[in-house]
Image (cartoon, grey):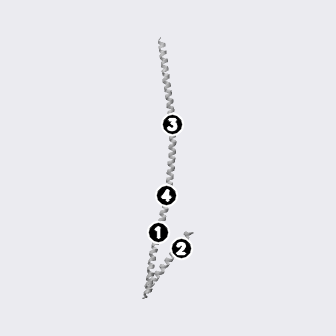
Amino acid sequence: MEEKEKGERWSGAMTNLTEMGSNLESLQKLLLTKAVFVDDETFAKASLTADQARTIKLRQQRVDTLEKEVDAAITAAARARSEKRQAEAAQKAAESRAQQLTTELENTTKVFELHMEELRAKQEEIKKRDEDIKLLEAIIQTLGGKESISTSV
């Protein structure tokens, strides 16, 4: 509600300034077209009025410039907010992807560890079987050597 009231007050003030400027210009034109000799007091008032008209015009131009700057600043702020939201969304997506990759890496590590344990167990089993085979070969050679000795007798 305050914004609306401010806007209405601002609009009213601007209308008043415009009307004053118009009145001053009319007075100035009237004075120029009806060049008359006036006393010093009237001339001083007219000069003051002309100065005020110039000041009003300059201030109106300054107000217009400031309004454009405010509009540009509002637009820039909106663009910055939008870019910030996009950056935050990109950061969240990157964090989510990093979390997914971390989880995937942890899972891959667990699977790798399980495979390594399985390979070690298989290696132990192969080593044990290899030792059993060597033992059996030794037994066979020993028995086979005795057989060769007993057949040759």
- At label 2, counting other C-alpha atoms closer than 10 Å, the crowd grade (few under 14, some 14-19, many 20 or more) is few
- Which residue occupies 49% across, 23% down? 135
Mark on residue 68? 1
**Residue 142 appears at what percent x and percent y?**
48, 18
- Which residue occupies 50% across, 59% down? 82
Q: Amino acid at mark 1?
A: Lys
Label 2, secondary structure: give it.
Answer: helix
Q: From the viewer's perspective, is residue 124 above or below residue 78?
A: above
Give how far apart the Cα atoms at labels 3 and 2 are: 79 Å
Q: Earlier in the sequence, mark 3 or mark 2?
A: 2
Q: Tell which tag, 3 or 2, sits nearer the viewer.
A: 2
Give how far apart the Cα atoms at labels 4 and 1 are: 24 Å
- At label 1, counting other C-alpha atoms closer than 10 Å, the crowd grade (few under 14, some 14-19, many 20 or more) is few
Q: Tell which tag, 2 or 1, sits nearer the viewer.
A: 2
**Residue 136 appears at what percent x and percent y?**
50, 22
Mark on residue 43? none
Q: Earlier in the sequence, mark 2 or mark 1?
A: 2
Q: Residue furthest top?
A: 153
Give how far apart the Cα atoms at labels 4 and 2 are: 35 Å
Q: 26 or 66: nearer the eye?
A: 66
Q: Amino acid at mark 3?
A: His
Give how far apart the Cα atoms at labels 3 and 4 are: 46 Å
Q: Earlier in the sequence, mark 4 or mark 1?
A: 1
Identify the residue position indicated by label 2 in the image.
9
Identify the residue position indicated by label 3 in the image.
115
Q: Amino acid at mark 4?
A: Lys
Label 3, secondary structure: give it.
Answer: helix
Identify the residue position indicated by label 4 in the image.
84
Q: Are marks 3 and 2 in contact (CB under 8 Å)?
A: no
Label 1, secondary structure: give it.
Answer: helix
Q: Earlier in the sequence, mark 1 or mark 3?
A: 1
